[in-house]
Image (tube, rainbow, N blue to C red):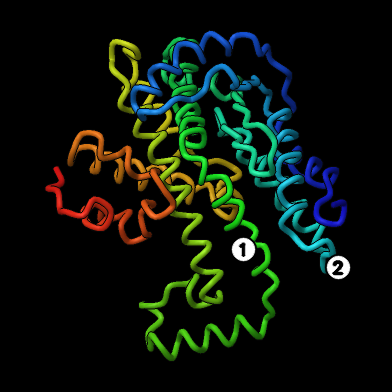
């Protein structure tokens, strides 16, 4: 496993772009779980199995370290044991830089345990405190709002046991396909150019990747968009009697996601903007599906076959016709 990633390189790279941070008290998270769990269970229609949930309140640096450990276990199972010269260093530095950038933005995360470890919910109090200050809202209400988002992810994986093996299989397939040669890429690009005869009509993934790898990446993107979209929809649909300042929180988190800074170029290269678009695309899908018919949103994650196709994410009526079997007027 040591040939796949270097923890020390990843940690050093992450801390190049992250200020030192201090540990925080984890005890305050338990009452929030008890408050948020019934709200989430009612919204998604399934249990989050609160009796077995693990939750930790982390500093930014602790969040980075926890994610490096998680990625290290996952990559050790899906990547080849031997890597090309320089690949370990490059992969480790890229992982560290990405986690360093995200550590200043992420407020919570549910790790479902793709490698067989128990799921765990992480909350990053430093970033939640920044959001609370920006919104002018109390720390408890802000933390509860973030907790609702993360517990929705918990509900998704607990209520849909097909998700973990499906994602692991897809990631393993992508890792296996990532060893394609330069000649394979060129051949695929030439074939795509002949087929489309126009750069404007060219899908970059389809042009540069073999069809099976392209399909797996699209599948992963669709699943992650659904997971983030439902969590976003649930947290933005909570009754105002529970979260009286939800509009202020929504405005603050939207500003936070759009903010620029000295790391803007690096953030773009590491996919921060793509993550933001994923939130919005998934949220719009769930909002339209839920408005079409009460309870219809609960069918989206019922099985692997019910996950929207990439085109259906932008056209929910097509998903409804395929999965439900009859067209429903969308509001």
- Indicate the position of residue 142 as horizontal and vertical percent values: 46, 17
Using a 10 Å C-alpha cutoff, classify the residue at mark 2 as few (fewer than 14 neighbours), some (14 to 19) or many (20 or more).
few
Find numbered disc 2 in the image and state the secondary structure of the residue it sits on.
loop
- Indicate the position of residue 223 as horizontal and vertical percent values: 46, 50
Which residue is painted at 59% across and 9% down in the image? 28
Residue at numbered disc 2? 85
Residue at numbered disc 1? 174
Asked if residue 25 lies left or right of residue 34, the reply is right
Q: Quadrant of residue 3?
A: bottom right
Which residue is painted at 87% across and 51% down in the image? 2
Decide: is 52 above or below 185.
above
Find numbered disc 1 in the image and state the secondary structure of the residue it sits on.
helix
Q: Quadrant of residue 246?
A: top left
Asked if residue 6 lies left or right of residue 259, the reply is right
Decide: is 273 above or below 67.
below
Rounded to the nearest angstrom, the CA distance separating label 2 from label 1 is: 20 Å
Q: Quadrant of the C terminus?
A: top left
Which residue is painted at 66% across and 41% down in the image? 99
Using a 10 Å C-alpha cutoff, classify the residue at mark 1 as few (fewer than 14 neighbours), some (14 to 19) or many (20 or more).
many
Q: Earlier in the sequence, mark 2 or mark 1?
A: 2
- Indicate the position of residue 72 as horizontal and vertical percent values: 76, 46
Decide: is 328 above or below 154.
below
Q: Quadrant of residue 79?
A: bottom right
Q: Which mark is residue 32?
A: none
- Indicate the position of residue 254 as horizontal and vertical percent values: 40, 34
Which residue is painted at 60% across and 43% down in the image? 262
């Amino acid at each position: 496993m040591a040939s796949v990633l270097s923890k020390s390189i990843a940690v050093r790279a992450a801390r190049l772009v992250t200020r030192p941070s201090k540990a925080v008290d984890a005890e305050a998270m338990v009452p929030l779980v008890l408050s948020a769990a019934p709200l989430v269970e009612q919204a998604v229609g399934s249990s989050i199995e609160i009796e077995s949930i693990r939750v930790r309140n982390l500093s930014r640096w602790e969040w980075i370290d926890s994610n490096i450990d998680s990625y290290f276990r996952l990559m050790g199972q899906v990547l080849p044991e031997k890597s090309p010269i320089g690949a370990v260093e490059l992969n480790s530095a890229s992982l560290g830089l990405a986690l360093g950038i995200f550590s200043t933005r992420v407020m919570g995360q549910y790790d479902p345990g793709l490698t067989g470890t128990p799921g765990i919910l992480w909350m990053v109090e430093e970033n939640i405190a920044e959001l609370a200050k920006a919104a002018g809202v109390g720390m408890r209400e802000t933390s509860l709002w973030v907790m609702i988002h993360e517990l929705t992810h918990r509900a998704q994986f607990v209520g849909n046991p097909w998700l973990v093996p499906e994602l692991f299989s897809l990631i393993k397939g992508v890792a296996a396909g990532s060893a394609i040669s330069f000649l394979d890429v060129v051949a695929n690009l030439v074939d795509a150019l002949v087929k489309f005869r126009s750069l404007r009509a060219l899908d970059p993934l389809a042009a540069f990747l073999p069809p099976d790898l392209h399909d797996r990446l699209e599948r992963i993107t669709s699943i992650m968009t659904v997971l983030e979209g439902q969590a976003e929809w649930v947290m933005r649909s909570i009754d105002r009697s529970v979260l009286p300042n939800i509009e202020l929180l929504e405005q603050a988190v939207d500003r936070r996601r759009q903010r620029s800074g000295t790391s803007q170029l690096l953030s773009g290269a590491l996919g921060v903007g793509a993550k933001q678009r994923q939130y919005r695309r998934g949220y719009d899908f769930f909002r339209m599906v839920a408005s079409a018919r009460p309870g219809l949103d609960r069918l989206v994650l019922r099985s692997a076959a019910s996950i929207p196709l990439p085109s259906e994410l932008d056209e929910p009526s097509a998903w409804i016709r395929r999965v439900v079997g009859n067209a429903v007027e969308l509001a």
